[in-house]
Amino acid sequence: MNYPSKLIENAIEEIAKLPGIGKKSALRMALHLLKRDEKQTLRLAEALTAMRTQIRYCQQCHNIADADLCGICANTKRDVSLLCVVEDTRDVLAIENTAQYRGLYHVLGGIISPLEGIGPADLKIDSLVQRIEAHLGTTQAVQEVILGLSPTMEGDTTAFYLTKRLKPLGVKISTIARGIPIGGDLEYADEITLGRSIIGRVAYD
């Protein structure tokens, strides 16, 4: 496509690099930004620049943060005895949006994937072990570690490795429930999900 301006072309090329954005969508966005009030567009550019240059990672859980501790770790009302281990920040956001969990998190920064060359040493696993060890026997001790990992081969491999590392510490290890979604039909469930639902069945109250 021939663009009327090299500046527009450069903007479209960069926008199109975002996930789920094609050239046509990038063109519409670029033209929209061009039509907006200049101050609004500059505020967007400033916000993106500040995000990229000033964002930090929590020293305790490795979640995205504005300071040394993220808002969750700094919140004294959270239950320090519960620690949910997740792959990345998107998982923290997903769980927080349920408003059902009041414990703390630990972000691994990925999952074990030999095919992609990602091993345990590439993840925040050592800091997880150290974090739990540091508070053993105190009022801040972690009582239960919840493995909030995706039910994939890589997720299961990571969960298995974490279980081996954490069991000697004497903490309870659990995993998020897996099974048929609310409102789902059994006939449309895949065999693995249905099988796990049967194995992980719960008492009917």
Image: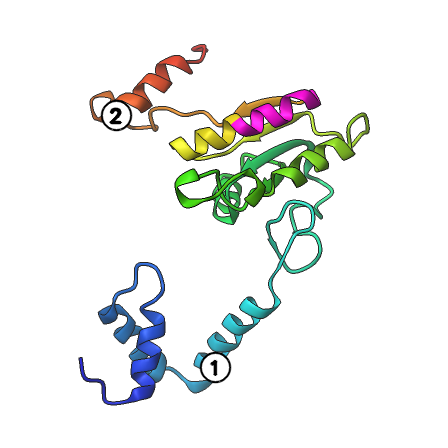
Q: Which of marks 2 and 1 is in front?
A: 2
Q: Which residue is drawn at 67% across and 34% down?
A: 129
Q: Residue 42 carries which label?
A: 1
Q: Residue at x 31, y 76 (%)?
A: 12
- Outermost residue, right side: 138
| Magenta-drawn segment | 161-170
Pointer 2: residues within 10 angstroms few (<14), some, or many (20+)?
Answer: few
Residue 75 x %, y %: 70, 46
Q: Is residue 167 magenta?
A: yes
Image height of 156 relative to 34, above or below: above
Q: Residue at x 69, y 25 (%)?
A: 143
Q: Does the magenta stretch include residue 33?
A: no
Return the residue at label 2.
190
Figure quadrant of residue 191: top left
Earlier in the chain: of badge 2 and badge 1, it is: 1
Q: Residue at x 22, y 85 (%)?
A: 3
Image height of 4 relative to 102, above or below: below
Residue 64 x %, y %: 59, 54
Q: In this view, does 17 lie to the left or right of 163?
A: left
Q: Is the magenta stretch mostly helix, strand or loop?
A: helix
Q: Is residue 174 left or right of residue 131?
A: left
Query: What's the residue type where badge 1 is placed?
Result: Leu
Pointer 1: residues within 10 angstroms few (<14), some, or many (20+)?
Answer: few
Separation (CA) of disc 2 from disc 1: 48 Å
Query: What's the residue type where badge 2 is placed?
Result: Asp
Figure quadrant of residue 192: top left
Figure quadrant of residue 134: top right
Question: Tag 1, which secondary structure?
Answer: helix
Q: Which of 25 and 136 is in front in this view?
A: 136
Residue 180 x %, y %: 33, 24
Q: Which of 141 and 77 is in front in this view?
A: 141
